[in-house]
Image (tube, rainbow, N blue to C red):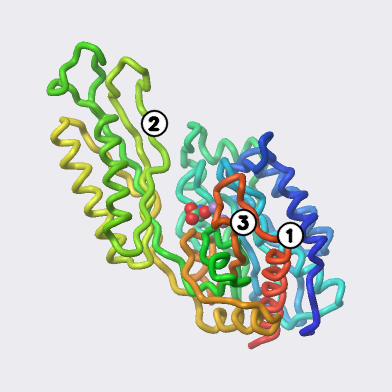
Amino acid sequence: MKELRINGRRLQERIAALGCIGALAGGGVCRLAFSRADKQARDHVEALMRQLRLEVHIDRIGNIAGVRQGEQAGAVVLAGSHIDTVGSAGMLDGSYGVMAALEAVETLNEACVRTRRPVAVMAFVNEEGARFMPDMMGSLIFRGDLSVEDARSITGIDGTTIGENIDRTGFAGDEPPGALPVHRYVELHIEQGPILEKEGCTIGVVEGVQGILWLAYTLRGATAHAGTTPVELRRDAAYVAGAVVQFVRRLALEIEGQCATVGSITLQPNLVNVVAEEARITVDLRNPDSGRLRMAAERLHAFVLETARAERVEVDRQIRVNVPPVSFDPSVIETVAAAAEGLGFRSRRMISGAGHDAQIMASVCRTGMIFVPSRGGLSHSIREDTAPEDLESGANVLLHTVLSLAQSN
Ligand code: HGY
Ligand code: MN
Ligand code: MN
């Protein structure tokens, strides 16, 4: 079976076809979670699963799995990722891993390979969390951290609830989340960063994922006239928000391994001649070291409180995501490394800067990840791209990793 290879042209065609769903006029893709485009993509994946003669399972939040029977029943070797996207996405983030997993299954079908263990493909819902926080929601629900009922009541950035969107699009299946027994989980993903390209490596053997904290701050001051109100009488929420943006960059520069981003700011009433009464900002903090991540959040909160106090602005903070750093399973890491070596690809070990469902699945079963290079390290951008030969190489490493895991004890 060592000579087995995926069909690179078919993989490209599958990625391009999925990329047409939710395509943006100026290029790129928008398939925000639980939107009509997301459901259309899910239907597209379901049709592919049935075409490959997989047994389809859709759970009550909409995670979809396709199972390929093995010689023995029981826990599956699961290759998964996600097909929802951020608002300004490329065609690869998440989608590549799901399409490559289906391509690996089709290659096994064509070669009439019967694996010992069942092999399955999963597309988790709402990995991005861009519309409805938290991110990695589908895998969190699969793991049992969040109930479907609680998830349905979550309100998104557009004011609608997940429940309303699930009912409107017919997203829900009838299976209980987490019912699928998983032996091993492996996720193939684009790196979304510059390391592999810079070092001329084809494959990233991922050893873990850094910790992620998402904080939502609501800063409440008071409206006032922009032309008549002296500074000392102002309670300017926008001024505090602006100070936070500057401080967040300092955290990233001063704390080792720290990423810190203010990705969204909304002001009320958001008018040119009115001092802002309210500012809502999100802060995305990440660090491979949980102690440093905690320190960053503590320093940030102290700064926000001090700056707001001086401006007589009230502060409300919500922790929306708090996922600790994870290390993947050594045996799965070695299986990925051996597959890459067996295929003659140059690889390097690394930590993921981006969050992934694998970060959640790492405490469900023995888990690993495979990366391929991102051109210019770009992602969450319509210019996201990976060389076709790298996409094919990654899919072959996934195929042989899955094969190895499905034949082993
Ligand atoms: O935010 C992330 O790292 C992932 O793309 N959800
Ligand atoms: Mn992703
Ligand atoms: Mn993403």
Name the residue at 73% across, 81% down.
72
In the rendered image, the vertical position of residue 281 relative to residue 114, given as above or below: above
Which residue type carries mark 2?
Thr
From this viewpoint, is residue 127 visible?
Answer: no
In the rendered image, the vertical position of residue 261 relative to residue 35, given as above or below: below
Q: Quadrant of ligand 2?
A: bottom right
Q: Where is residue 294 drawn, in percent x and y?
A: 28, 60
Separation of disc 1 and disc 2 at Cα?
A: 41 Å
Q: Nearer the viewer, residue 175 or 351?
A: 351
Name the residue at 86% across, 76% down.
111
Q: Where is residue 105 drawn, in percent x and y?
A: 77, 69
Separation of disc 2 and disc 3 at Cα?
A: 28 Å
Q: In the displayed structure, does residue 245 sit left or right of residue 39?
A: left
Q: Are marks 1 and 3 in contact (CB under 8 Å)?
A: no
Q: In the displayed structure, does residue 70 sit left or right of residue 148?
A: right
- Does ligand 2 reach within 8 Å of label 3's beta carbon? yes
Q: Nearer the viewer, mark 1 or mark 3?
A: 3
Q: Are marks 2 and 3 in contact (CB under 8 Å)?
A: no
| Nearest to N terminus: mark 2 or mark 3 | 3
Separation of disc 1 and disc 3 at Cα?
A: 19 Å
| Nearest to N terminus: mark 1 or mark 2 | 1
Q: Which mark is residue 266?
A: 2
Residue located beneath label 3 in the image: 94
Regarding mark 2 in the picture, which secondary structure is present there? strand
Q: Nearer the viewer, mark 1 or mark 2?
A: 2
Residue located beneath label 1 in the image: 56
| Nearest to N terminus: mark 1 or mark 3 | 1
Regarding mark 1 in the picture, which secondary structure is present there? strand
Which residue type carries mark 3?
Gly
The quarter of the image holding the C terminus is: bottom right
